[in-house]
Amino acid sequence: MPVYLSSSPCTHLLDELPTDIIYYEIFPYLDYASRVTANLLLHPGDRLRTPLRKGALKEFSMKFSGSIVKTLILKQNTTINPIARNRLTLKIWRTMPMFPELVQHCAKFRRVVTEKAADFINPNPDDATKVSSYTLKTLKGLCEHYLLLLETCYPYAGEVAIPWGDWTAVNY
């Protein structure tokens, strides 16, 4: 009968080595993915657990939401067709309430968004001729709702510094 079909526990080379040797002599030479894989090969009681850094979830959610909003804004800036541009503008303001952490933990972003929303609520008459009345009415409603959310549901909760480089959620 093949070994992998037998009822006896599976043994491999890592079962033969002392865990101290594995931790101090092998793990330092492995990259993160290899370390995770090697850790999974160990007996569950011998596995190293690395907790997430404090604030890593908030940092990740800000990086994730920032990348989505940035993509939409860049797409809107490069769009030439006025109808597609108006649709992207509405999409941006429909997307913004999905990511409250951006305005709760970044004062500069909050200030810019507040100013833009105020501009869209009271548009310049020259700019109003470039868009349809439906877009103006919808955009005004979306921006008023968003400003109300900022005042009632999304208060400023303090600045969160986001490291922009090789970001990781765990400490080594």
Image (spheres, rainbow, N blue to C red):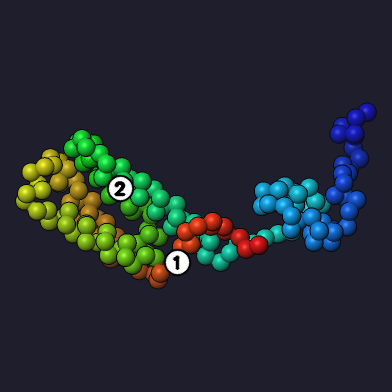
Q: Where 141 sits versus 130, above or below?
A: below
Q: Quadrant of residue 111?
A: bottom left
Q: Where 74 sits versus 5, above or below?
A: below
| Label 2 SS | helix
Instruction: In this rendered view, identify the residue nearer to me: 9 or 69.
Output: 69
Direction right: furthest residue: 1
Residue drawn at the location 52% of the way across and 65% of the way down: 55
Horizontal relation, residue 36 to residue 116: left or right: right
Q: Bin the neighbour count of mark 2 within 10 Å (Cα to Cα): few under 14, some 14-19, many 20 and up.
A: some
Instruction: In this rendered view, identify the residue nearer to me: 143 or 82.
Output: 82
Q: Which residue is mark 1?
A: 161
Q: Quadrant of residue 11?
A: top right
Label 2 vs 1, first from the N-terminus:
2
Horizontal relation, residue 149 to residue 131: left or right: right
The amino acid type, in three-letter code, at marker 2 is Ile
Direction bottom: furthest residue: 158
> Label for residue 16?
none
Instruction: In this rendered view, identify the residue nearer to me: 75 or 47.
Output: 75
Determine the CA span between mark 2 and mark 1.
22 Å
Residue drawn at the location 23% of the way across and 51% of the way down: 142
Residue 74: % across, % down = 31, 46
Is residue 91 visible in this depiction of the protein?
Answer: no
Is residue 12 visible in this depiction of the protein?
Answer: yes
Q: Bin the neighbour count of mark 1 within 10 Å (Cα to Cα): few under 14, some 14-19, many 20 and up.
A: few
Residue 105: % across, % down = 39, 65
Q: Which residue is mark 2?
A: 73
The amino acid type, in three-letter code, at marker 1 is Ala
Direction front: furthest residue: 29
